[in-house]
Image (cartoon, grey):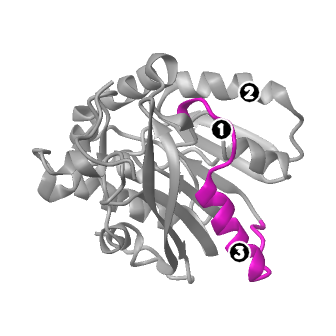
Amino acid sequence: MSQPEAGRELGARELSVSPKSQELSDRGLAWDQEYGEIRAYTTSYRGDIDRGVRFLLGYLATHRETIDGPIVDCGCGIGRNAIPLAQEGHQVIGLEHSAVALHLLQERLGEGALAGTLTTQQHDLNEPLPIEDDFAAAVLDITAVDNLVDAELRRGYGREVGRILMPGGVVIVVTFARNDGYYGPWLKSSPWREEGVVEDPNTGIRNKLFTANELDAVFAPPLVREVGSTLVFIDDAAGVTWTRRFLMHIYRNQGYSVPDD
């Protein structure tokens, strides 16, 4: 597999397909291939809950705050976060573009009983979220927003997240930093360098790499960033060990309505 030159380090809504989303429809096929055949990323097959999610849930716990209400997991993949949260008693709705990932998630559901509930739906995050207004106590976005390589679509997604989040609710975001050890080196030669977008030659998947301000531009306003941190850890990708660098943010809905453009 190719390696960078450097670095080790539910309430349904009626939906319509936008032209820009149609142009990006091959993204679902690329993820089907990654989950089913390539498996360059450990998140495509590993079932343990994400490090960033553990950290951010721990932050909420230290402030004596629990998530009391439904959780929407955007880009839930094989359920590595959705299943443990449902096992702890939460009501979780998982949205995922890849049919292969959802099939693998359903297979994993047989591994243990759920104290809560887990509902899944195939959905492209380029489109409006199929969730009612003010529905979610929390939204998880664990390396999902980075798949939205178009700035206009990212901002529309951020407004949708704000729309479905109840007052006082939180968005937990973990995404790739610009200096990530795996993706970062490809940025220098990327034709989309100015936009911070790279294409992984191992998978054909394009990802947006973020600065903290760029991530804020997706979700805030109307949401307010409450936590901003960087997660650094060692992990494998494409059969090689890298130093990974992710941004970890919590955004909160302080009760303001989402303005229409």
Q: Amino acid at mark 1?
A: Gly
Residue 79: image tag: 1
Q: Residues within 10 Å of mark 2 (few under 14, many from 20)?
A: some
Q: Quadrant of the N terminus?
A: top left
Q: Quadrant of the C terminus?
A: bottom left
Most distant residue in the top direction: 37
Q: Position of residue 135 (x, y in %)?
A: 64, 61
Q: Residue 247, located in which quarter of the rendered image?
A: bottom left
Disc 3 or 2, which lies upstream in sequence?
3
Badge 1 marks a residue whose secondary structure is: loop
Q: Amino acid at mark 3?
A: Leu
Residue 163: image tag: none
Q: Amino acid at mark 2?
A: Arg
Magenta run includes residue 11 = no
Distance from the alpha carbon under mark 3 to that under mark 2: 28 Å
CB of mark 2 within 8 Å of CB of mark 1? yes
Please provide the residue range marked out in magenta: 44-68
Q: Is residue 197 above or below residue 96?
A: below
**Residue occupied by mark 2:** 108
Q: Residue, x 34% and y 27% (percent of image)?
A: 203
**Residue occupied by mark 3:** 60
Q: Position of residue 99 (x, y in %)?
A: 52, 24
163 relative position to 118: left or right: left
